[in-house]
Amino acid sequence: MNARGAGKRRPSDPLYGSFTSSSSYKPMLYLALAELPFSFRTVNLKIGVQSTPEYLAINRWGGVPSLRHRQSDRTLVVSPSLIRSIFA
Ligand SMILES: N[C@@H](CCC(=O)N[C@@H](CS)C(=O)NCC(=O)O)C(=O)O
């Protein structure tokens, strides 16, 4: 696998997701394989954290995953595009 920036040190990007969500596992796996730093932030879907104003400010659609790219100041909210961005 070839990932731009793999192994380089930079501030970790927060990945918001749930351990009950396969859509969250996929980007988590790819970030780990690319050795990119990220911090996993749990969004508990069972108690509705995805619908709180705090989380809707991160992802207006109220879903997981969400990956905050600090460098580009963008938040990606759909796992396939999020994974593509890791290897772009
Ligand atoms: N196609 C989307 C699907 C994301 C999705 O369906 N996420 C679910 C969890 S797997 C979700 O956020 N559900 C919100 C809810 O249960 O209220 C992706 O791959 O990112």
Image (cartoon, rainbow, N blue to C red):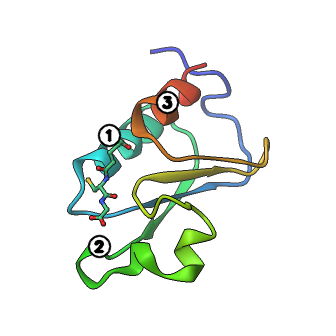
Quarter of the figure with the C terminus? top right
Q: Secondary structure at mark 3?
A: helix
Asked whether 5 or 49 is in front, the reply is: 49
Q: Which residue is mark 2?
A: 45
Q: Are marks 2 and 1 in contact (CB under 8 Å)?
A: no
Residue drawn 44% across the image and 15% down it: 1
Q: Residue furthest top?
A: 2
Work out whether 40 lies above or below 67. Answer: below
**Residue 56 position in % (x across, y down):** 55, 70
Q: Quadrant of residue 72?
A: top right
What's the mark number on residue 39?
none
**Residue 86 position in % (x across, y down):** 55, 30
Q: Nearer the viewer, mark 1 or mark 3?
A: 3
Q: Quadrant of residue 21?
A: bottom left
Instruction: Answer with left or right where residue 53 lies relative to residue 25.
Output: right
Residue drawn 45% across the image and 41% down it: 78
Q: Which residue is mark 3?
A: 81
For marks 2 and 1 on the same chain, the one whose residue lies earlier in the sequence: 1
> Is ligand 1 less than 8 Å from the beta carbon at label 2?
yes
Q: Residues within 10 Å of mark 1 (few under 14, many from 20)?
A: some
**Residue 25 position in % (x across, y down):** 30, 48
For marks 1 and 3 on the same chain, the one whose residue lies earlier in the sequence: 1
> Is ligand 1 less than 8 Å from the beta carbon at label 1?
yes
Name the kind of residue labelled 1 in the image: Lys
Question: Is residue 34 among the parts visible in the rendering?
Answer: no
Asked whether 8 or 82 is in front, the reply is: 82
Q: Secondary structure at mark 2?
A: helix
Q: Residue furthest front?
A: 61
Q: Which residue is mark 1?
A: 26
